[in-house]
Amino acid sequence: MKYSYLALGDSYTIGEQVLPEENFPNETVTLLNQSPSAVANPHGGGSYSAPEIIATTGWTTDELDTAIDEANLSSTYDIVSLLIGVNNQYRGRSVENFAIEFEGLLKRAIHFASNIPNHVFVLSIPDWGVTPFAEGSDKKKIAEEIDAYNNVCKLIAEKWNTHYIDITSSQRKDGYKQEFLAADKLHPSGKEYRKWAIQLATVIQSVFN
């Protein structure tokens, strides 16, 4: 059988300025299909289909919610990932407002995962303040706000019994290095996305194998 995957997010999910195969949803599927455990899957030895991605650069939580409505998704998925919030922070929106809208999105993600919370994977929000793009900005403030947003993501993910994957800690270590950046010096390169994909694929394998 083929396992289906829905990826919800913004520029970090669509992979701004990288080839489609280099974004983390596609990288994750590639890793899963290369893994020997994919063949020995007790659910029938299935492989993983190319991800369906609903994500656009610049989207906030409410804009993603609207896009989901417009996509008119009728099917359910074996895997759903959610990475959203950086544009809420960038636009100066409150953490309280983010919490309300993020929880709404997570509940929708669970619904798309056939109401199985264990099949939903929340990825933490990267810290754009460590990138060269943020030169001249208050990087300490950005980091504090990203931490506050991610605390919300973690608490709500735990509340609904979904997975929470911290990609921010490692991203902060490499976010200023050229090899881990796209040409705009803001978005990640395929090399950074592969790091996230390894983390996500590892957790997915723990669920499906």
Image: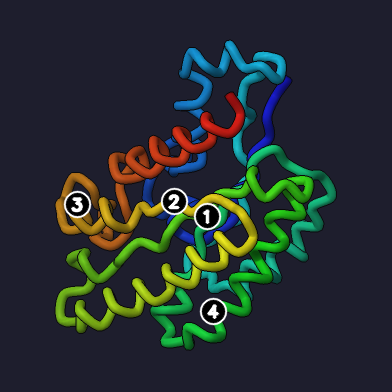
Q: Is residue 142 above or below residue 114?
A: below
Q: Is residue 73 above or below residue 137?
A: above
Q: Amino acid at mark 4?
A: Phe
Q: Earlier in the sequence, mark 1 or mark 2?
A: 1
Please name the residue that numbered disc 3 is placed on: 174
The x and y percentages for residue 63 are: 62, 73
Q: Is residue 203 above or below residue 189?
A: above
Q: Nearer the viewer, mark 2 or mark 3?
A: 2
Q: Quadrant for residue 100, please give it.
A: bottom right
The x and y percentages for residue 75 are: 82, 45
Q: Residues within 10 Å of mark 2 (few under 14, many from 20)?
A: some
Please name the residue that numbered disc 2 is placed on: 165
Q: Earlier in the sequence, mark 2 or mark 3?
A: 2
Q: Nearer the viewer, mark 4 or mark 3?
A: 4
Q: Earlier in the sequence, mark 1 or mark 3?
A: 1
Q: Amino acid at mark 1?
A: Val
The circle drawn on residue 122 is 1
